[in-house]
Structures are given as C-alpha cells and as structure tokens.
Image (cartoon, grey):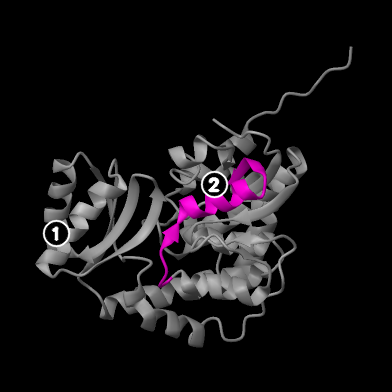
Amino acid sequence: MDTGLRTEAAIVFPAISPASFSNVGKFMLMNPAARRLSATADQVLGYSLLDRFRAAEGDYEESARIAFLVNCLAMAEWAAETLGPDPVAYAGPSFGGTPAAVHSGALDFSEAVRLTAATGRRIEEYFTREHRDVVTQSFARTPEDKLAEVLRELDDRGDWYDISCHVDHDFYMLSLREHRLEWLNARLRALGGLPLSTMRPPMHSSAFRSLRETLEREVYADVAFGDPALPVVSDHDGSLLRTGEELRTLLLDAAVRPVRWPTVMETLRGLGVGTLHVCGPDNLWGRVRGVTDHFEVVALSPQVAMRPRRRDVAV
C-alpha cells in the first residue's frame, strides 16, 4: 500500500449490495442513529421498514434498498462519533451517491427515502416494458487489452453493448443482450477472465435515456438539493461536485452514465487522501486492488460497530 505523504481522509459509501436482515438487523435495532433513521423512514414509507425488511425475500426489493441507505448513514454517524475522521470529500459509486448526498448535507434524509422508493418503482416498471432482453454482466481478471479484444468481436458481429462499470484495472461490468451472454462468458474464460454475477435489471447505459427522463419528470421534479458541506467526487468522471444542482444531476445520470471507479480514486489521491472510511456493507468497492494498493481502507460495517470496544483502563 502506497499512501506516500497523503494524510487526508475521505468517506466512501459503497454501491448497494446484498445485506439480509439476519446480517444487519441487530445493528438496526440497537444503534441509536439507525433506530432514528428507521423511524423517519417509517413515516415516509407508511409502513415499518424493519418489519418489511425482516420479511423481504429479495436482495434488492424496496425495504432492502432503504435499509441499506439507513445502515450506510448510521455507520457514517458512528464513525464520526467513534473514530473521528475529518474528511475532505465524499464519494460513492452508483447508489452510493445517495447516502453521499445526504451525509454531505445536500439532500434531506426523508427526501432520500422517498427518492429511493420511487426510483426503484420506476426502474421496475421501466424494465418490465423496455430492454427486457438486456442484462449487465460483471467480470474480473480481464485487463483492458483483453476487454478490447472481446468488444471488437462484438462489434464485428454487429451486437449492441455498453460498458456500465469500470471497477478496477481488470474488473468491469458490461451490458449486452441476453442471447449473447453465454458467448461472452465463454470468451472471457478463454482469455483468462472470470465471469461473476449477472444483473437484472441492467444498469448505467446511455440506452436508458427515457428512464432518466421519467425519473427527472416524475420523481426529482420537486426535490430540493442544497450545496454540500464538502465536495462529492463524481463516480462518472471524477469531478468535484460542489453544488446541489450538480448532485441532483449526478443521481439522475446514474441511469445513463457508467461508473468509473479508478477515476474517483485518482481524484481522491490528488486531494491528498490516504485513508478511506468505507461506511456500509461492502463486498467490492473498498476491496479491489486499485483501492487497497493506494489507500488505507477502514471498512466500517454494522458488524464492526456491534463489536465490543476496548476501553483503556487508568492505572
């Protein structure tokens, strides 16, 4: 790990990942911030978040997404009180932009709950009608030159595709039509790559422009965004976002613009950041080599917060 003379810290909120009630429920029931945020979410949703989350059967249904938001923000509060990071910026890939907007002070939590629920419903409705044959495939161990070879072959076949996420130097997510998925995975394996999960619905493609327009018109139209207390690093191009309007655009553009995580890391290094506090359940974004080789990563999950903390005893 090379942090050089970089002594600053940043708070990172991960993209949403599976986190069942059995894994995080105890934290949500016992942590004061999580309880407070859950109570506010109950008022916005009109149902008990914890009850619905406890009974959830899918990893990404509405209650699971909002529980993830609650846990990310509660962990950030716990970190501030317990570890005292003094960040210079916030960042979050994909859905992580929402807790980043809230924690930066740009978006009210109640509005974030409403946006998360309404956005999820619009996405589900959209992909029931549109792009029903498109999936997003994640894969590792595929450097840029090997990926370029695969993409040339898709071009030669006249097949549509879109890079949805650039996670690390050899880790990508590619959207394409489902009938090409078997070919893609076989081709990746032949080149030494490792196909991972297949996501339905797909994500982050310019082909979903009408979804973005629907979200802007029906979900975001009356939502007020303030300016963040600290800049938020765009997961699309690594730029520093300092206004509420820029953050509003960031969240809307998640429908149509790819995540470029190495670019975010480059920006944070340029700010002198050497430590990342990753707040929330994370199976990926704080663990790839492009992060761990250049930063000290403090992984803050609900399980970490629930561990008994050692108290110094005066002698």
Q: Is residue 189 at least partly visible in the picture?
A: yes
- Tell me: 235 left or right of 242: left
Choose between 166 and 137: the one closer to the eye: 166
Which residue is depicted at the point 42% across and 72% down?
255
Residue 95 position in % (x across, y down): 49, 61
Q: Is residue 249 above or below residue 154?
A: below
For badge 1, the amino acid type reads: Glu
For badge 2, the amino acid type reads: Gly
Q: Are marks 1 and 2 in contact (CB under 8 Å)?
A: no
Q: Which residue is mark 2?
A: 25
Residue 26 position in % (x across, y down): 57, 43
Task: State the extent of the magenta-drawn residues as a range.
Answer: 255-280
Q: Which residue is mark 1?
A: 153
Which residue is depicted at the point 29% across and 40% down?
141
Residue 222 position in % (x across, y down): 61, 86
Q: Residue furthest top?
A: 315
Q: Residue furthest right?
A: 315
> Of discs 1 and 2, which sits in the foreground?
1
Which residue is depicted at the point 68% across and 59% down?
103
286 inside magenta stretch: no
Choose between 157 and 23: the one closer to the eye: 157
